[in-house]
């Protein structure tokens, strides 16, 4: 079956579907499934816009409301995960997944489904350390804070995904796994996105939670978006002695002209199974067995692990799967039970500012929770769930409020700055089709694509065509072949463990409010051959002053130090080569003795007793010689205390002369 994968959707369903239709017609193929890696923006009406964390000038309905209302039907079975620009109120109705419109399925906070026997996993949202170990406490009405924290990944969902023990074919995330850039051409990435350099050099780009899942699940393919750039990589896992498993990673761009946001994958499937969504039995067992760990408060709660007093291993056994199959009558096909839960948008009505929609329960979630006997979070918030009573939740909230204020300030900007235009000023370049089994279809370069000039690409709700005029055809996975060749060369050039070991090692992230203590797979699992050796990261030179300051443990908030820095700036003759040497604070008793001695010397008029030469020029010459010796490295290394005393003496002497 042919699967199309798209990066960030941003509500542009019409344009994506039109592009797929053009590819089918151009290449005489049939696309069976569309996967979208987040920022889907399932906005049904104007009220939903109030729940989406985007600047006001980006609050646009786009085209999803047409598919929700029934005006249009998705021509392809569409599956998506959540990103950081979503109508969060609607997606929260479906925490375990469900239909958001006919033929369009949301995977929930985390999940595994099957289509034609192909197992597809997904994790919605982006990683933020301060919220990682909290519960899914957010619900409408959102404030400015919860409108953003609602899409932050939680450890509970990652814990559930880590219970997966059976093979997964495709995995979707919005965030990149942290360090994945070390398995592709990182220099090429930094040429496209120069402002990633600092995070790449400090190994901070991407999600440590997704990195953990990458080495645990080891899917055949991992697709992501969020960073608005196409980037391929290959990770080779050591699954057993002499045996390796490969994950092909591909990040895609957002839906804009001349951007590489679409890829087509040819994957063999079970011909005996229909190309429809089926619930995954292993995942259903995990949902049921881990339901008691659910956290719906702001309180930090850590998942159990090795050495814990409670159960932490929920690996699914075959008898558990048999029981679930029996409970579902042997049929795990997802029913087409979509129901509208919000008013339909009427484009003819004038747009008015409205309040956020109210909290409600979705019948799809109610059905699944009833079948598995698990918790519906919205039912809890509404006081209609028998697992958790409202008064119990209130007590948990009260206890958790003490911890919620910690960790503020460690949150980075959720927005991805884009250095290119976001308006549709021209046509896109897209992808081509390959006949090889399980092969990526190469994207055409923008230089090789020519676009029709008579097509209108406005950002309003008008029907517009989005078909490329020309699509190049390629049967080779050139980008991945290049990476594989580089990794092979790296193995040949140096077979030492240090060269072969992946830079993705252990994750140990601690913030004030919460921490993610996640040990990844064993070192054997990570003895891959990243292309980091073939594409060494070219670091920008760092100024000597910055290096010196970074290497010293200096409390820059110390008032005494700030006072000395100000004095040093006024007396630049005390510095060498333009570099300010920071004097370390010393004991006040020693300074008082020096000041007392200098005052006595001043009142007596005895320059010799104060250690100062009668000839100021002699002092200056002597000082110049000592400075020269220090600069040339011929003088003795002076302690910080001695330097500070000398600077204080010289400053006081200067003040006396003035």
Image (tube, rainbow, N blue to C red):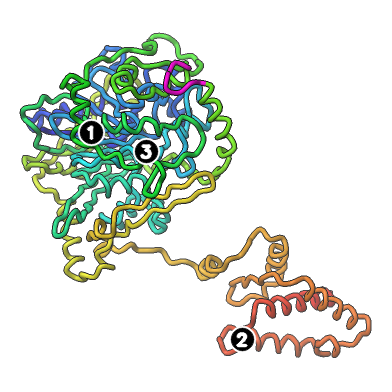
Q: What whole-number distance in Å separates the C-alpha atoms at marks 1 and 3?
A: 44 Å
> Which of these two is toward me, 459 or 114?
114
What segment carries the magenta color? 383-390
Of helix, strand and loop, which one carries label 2?
Answer: helix
503 vs 450, nearest the viewer: 503
Query: Residue placed farthest to the front in the image?
Result: 309
For label 2, the residue is 628
User: Where does label 3 land, which residue?
Assistant: 421
Q: Position of residue 346 (x, y in %)?
A: 38, 10
Work out whether 240 lies above or below 5: below
Which badge, 1 or 3, comes first in the chain's sequence?
A: 1
Q: Earlier in the sequence, mark 3 or mark 2?
A: 3
**As rendered, which of 127 and 477 lies closer to the eye?**
127
Query: Where is residue 166, by image quadrant?
Result: top left
Tell me: residue 327, above or below residue 166.
above
Q: Disc 3 on helix, strand or loop?
A: loop
Q: Which residue is mark 1?
A: 282
Residue 456 lies left or right of residue 19; in this view the side is right
Q: Residue 249 appears at what percent x and percent y?
A: 24, 46
Question: In the figure, residue 571 lies in which quadrant?
Answer: bottom right
- Above or below for 406 versus 204: above
Residue sitting at the far right:
604
Badge 1 element? helix
Residue 67 in the image, given as x and y percentages of width and height: 28, 17
* Front disc: 1 or 3: 1
Name the chief secondary structure element in magenta: loop
| Number of marks present in the image shown | 3
Judge left or right: residue 162 versus residue 401.
left
Residue 227 located within the stretch drawn in magenta: no
Q: Which mark is nearer the camera, 3 or 2?
A: 2
């Amino acid at each position: 079956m042919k699967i199309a994968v798209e990066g960030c959707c941003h509500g542009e369903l019409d344009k994506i579907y039109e592009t797929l239709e053009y590819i089918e017609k151009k290449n005489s193929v049939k696309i069976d499934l569309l996967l979208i890696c987040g920022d889907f923006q399932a906005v049904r009406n104007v009220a939903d816009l109030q729940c989406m964390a985007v600047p006001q000038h980006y609050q646009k309905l786009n085209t999803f409301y047409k598919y929700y209302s029934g005006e249009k039907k998705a021509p392809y079975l569409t599956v998506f995960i959540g990103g950081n620009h979503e109508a969060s109120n609607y997606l929260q109705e479906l925490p375990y997944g469900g239909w958001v419109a006919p033929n369009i399925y949301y995977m929930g906070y985390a999940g595994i489904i099957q289509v034609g026997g192909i197992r597809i996993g997904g994790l919605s949202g982006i990683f933020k350390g301060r919220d990682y170990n909290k519960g899914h406490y957010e619900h409408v009405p959102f404030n400015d804070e919860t409108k953003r924290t609602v899409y932050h990944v939680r450890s509970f969902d990652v814990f559930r995904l880590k219970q997966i023990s059976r093979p997964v074919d495709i995995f979707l995330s919005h965030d990149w796994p942290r360090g994945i850039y070390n398995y592709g051409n990182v220099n090429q990435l930094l040429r496209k996105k120069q402002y990633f350099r600092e995070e790449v050099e400090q190994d901070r780009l991407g999600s440590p939670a997704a990195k953990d899942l990458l080495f645990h699940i080891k899917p055949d393919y991992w697709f992501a978006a969020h960073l608005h750039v196409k980037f391929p990589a290959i990770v080779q896992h050591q699954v057993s002695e002499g045996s390796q498993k490969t994950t092909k990673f591909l990040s895609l761009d957002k839906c804009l002209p001349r951007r590489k946001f679409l890829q087509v994958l040819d994957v063999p499937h079970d011909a005996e199974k229909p190309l429809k969504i089926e619930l995954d039995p292993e995942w259903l067992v995990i949902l049921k067995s881990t339901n008691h760990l659910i956290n719906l408060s702001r309180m930090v709660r850590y998942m159990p692990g090795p050495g814990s007093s409670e159960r932490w291993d929920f690996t699914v056994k075959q008898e558990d799967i048999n029981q679930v199959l029996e409970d579902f009558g042997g049929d795990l096909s997802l029913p087409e039970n979509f129901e509208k839960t919000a008013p339909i948008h009427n484009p003819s009505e004038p747009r008015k500012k409205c309040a956020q929609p109210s909290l409600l329960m979705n019948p799809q979630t109610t059905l699944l929770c009833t079948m598995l006997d698990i918790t519906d979070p919205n039912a809890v918030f509404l006081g209609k769930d028998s697992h958790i009573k409202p008064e119990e939740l209130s007590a948990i909230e009260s206890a958790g409020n003490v911890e919620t204020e910690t960790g503020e300030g460690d949150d980075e900007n959720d927005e991805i700055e884009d250095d290119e235009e976001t308006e549709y000023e021209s046509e896109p370049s897209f992808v081509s089709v390959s006949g090889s089994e399980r092969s990526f279809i190469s994207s055409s370069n923008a230089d090789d694509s020519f676009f029709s000039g008579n097509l209108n690409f406005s950002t309003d709700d008008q029907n517009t065509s989005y078909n490329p005029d020309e699509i190049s055809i390629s049967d080779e996975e050139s980008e991945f072949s290049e990476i594989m060749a580089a990794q092979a060369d790296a193995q040949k050039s140096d077979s030492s463990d240090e060269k072969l070991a992946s830079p993705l090692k252990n994750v140990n992230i601690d913030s004030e409010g919460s921490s993610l203590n996640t040990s990844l797979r064993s070192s054997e699992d990570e003895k891959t051959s990243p292309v980091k050796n073939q594409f060494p990261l070219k670091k920008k030179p760092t100024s000597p002053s910055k290096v010196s300051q970074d290497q010293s443990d200096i409390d820059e908030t110390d008032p005494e130090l700030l006072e000395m820095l100000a004095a040093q700036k006024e007396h630049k003759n005390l510095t060498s080569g333009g570099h300010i040497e920071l004097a370390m604070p010393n004991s006040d008793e020693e300074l008082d003795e020096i000041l007392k001695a200098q005052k006595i010397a001043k009142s007596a008029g005895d320059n010799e007793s104060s250690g100062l030469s009668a000839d100021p020029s002699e002092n200056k010459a002597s000082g110049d010689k000592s400075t020269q010796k220090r600069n040339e490295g011929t003088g003795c290394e002076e302690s910080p205390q001695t330097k500070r005393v000398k600077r204080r003496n010289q400053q006081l002497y200067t003040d006396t002369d003035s």
